[in-house]
Image (tube, rainbow, N blue to C red):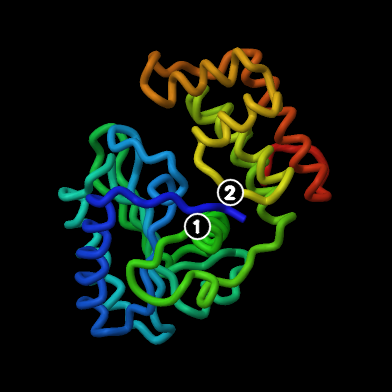
Amino acid sequence: MTDPAHPPGQVLSYVRSLADRVGGSLGGRLRAAYLHGSAVLGGWRPERSDVDVLFVTEDDVSRQEVTAVGAVLAAAEAGCPGQGLECSVVTVGQAGRPREPWPFLLHVARGRGGARTRIVDGGGRPGDPDLLMHYAVCRAAGRPVRGPAPAELIGSVPRPVILGYLAGELHWGIEHGSEAYAVLNACRAQVFLADGRIMSKIAGGNVALAQDLGPGAVIRRALDQQQGRVPPRDPGRGAAEFVLAVAAALRSAAGRPPGRCG
């Protein structure tokens, strides 16, 4: 089990207000809004963290209503208490039976490097694999700001699917992410592999140190980067070796051959 952290008050207030606006744009057909990510896993840092939200609607929402929701979410970026808003909008049918290709109605992500908020319409895409982890985090620790407990609306994602996804994320992190991102994701992936707990990057790093799950110097350096004590850096050789070894263990446990993809 995962023990949810108490979300920061300013994050909860922001998401409650946002859920009210999204619900209004849907004419009462918003079934639930779940806060997830670092705000509920205990790793929230306003200078680094996004506000992660999953909205679940009725199955019969129109494209016009989806467009209206996108406008509400794009406008909400300015008041976000963290680094930006990251959220997905799915139907109750999509959430209740999570499966490939992980379809969705709408995805909203903050722009990188000063770019504008990205609004992605799910109607023209097969799906978003990242949703499988959003579902898993919501079921484990999601905070309902509207609607029932997450497990009442969101179906379970099979463990081998999650393990394969995490392995793919680790490969991506080595190629595109910072050392802290790659190493601490590897740490928390090891914890999930061991006992099914889902936790923040910082908590994962601390558990890995306490249980000697990886190179201590590399993990401590990653924790220092994540907490702003030292500047970020690209993954070094020791970090890459550690992360790739964890990815291989994940893929083996998932029953998948070695490779880059999740």
Q: What amino acid is found at the position of numbered circle 2 in the picture?
A: Ile
Residue 212 as seen in the image, left or right of residue 199: right
Residue topped by disc 1: 141
Residue beneath the point at 43% across and 55% down: 36
Question: Between residues 209 and 192, which one lies in front from this camera angle?
Answer: 209
| Percent of width and height locating residue 98 | 59, 69
Q: How many marks?
A: 2
Q: Earlier in the sequence, mark 2 or mark 1?
A: 1
Residue 41 as seen in the image, left or right of residue 198: left
Label of residue 198 in the image = 2
Considering the image in quadrants, where does the N terminus appear? bottom right
**Circles 2 and 1: CB atoms closer than 8 Å:** yes
- Asked whether residue 128 is in view, the answer is no
Q: What amino acid is found at the position of numbered circle 1 in the picture?
A: Ala
| Percent of width and height locating residue 153 | 51, 76
| Percent of width and height locating residue 179 | 52, 22
Question: Between residues 97 and 142, which one lies in front from this camera angle?
Answer: 142
Question: Between residues 23 and 124, which one lies in front from this camera angle?
Answer: 23
Label of residue 73 in the image = none
Quarter-wise, where is residue 172 in the image?
A: top right
Quarter-wise, where is residue 74 in the image?
A: bottom left
| Percent of width and height locating residue 121 | 37, 64
Quarter-wise, where is residue 190 in the image?
A: top right
Height in image: 104 above or below 239?
below
Helix, strand or loop status at disc 2? loop
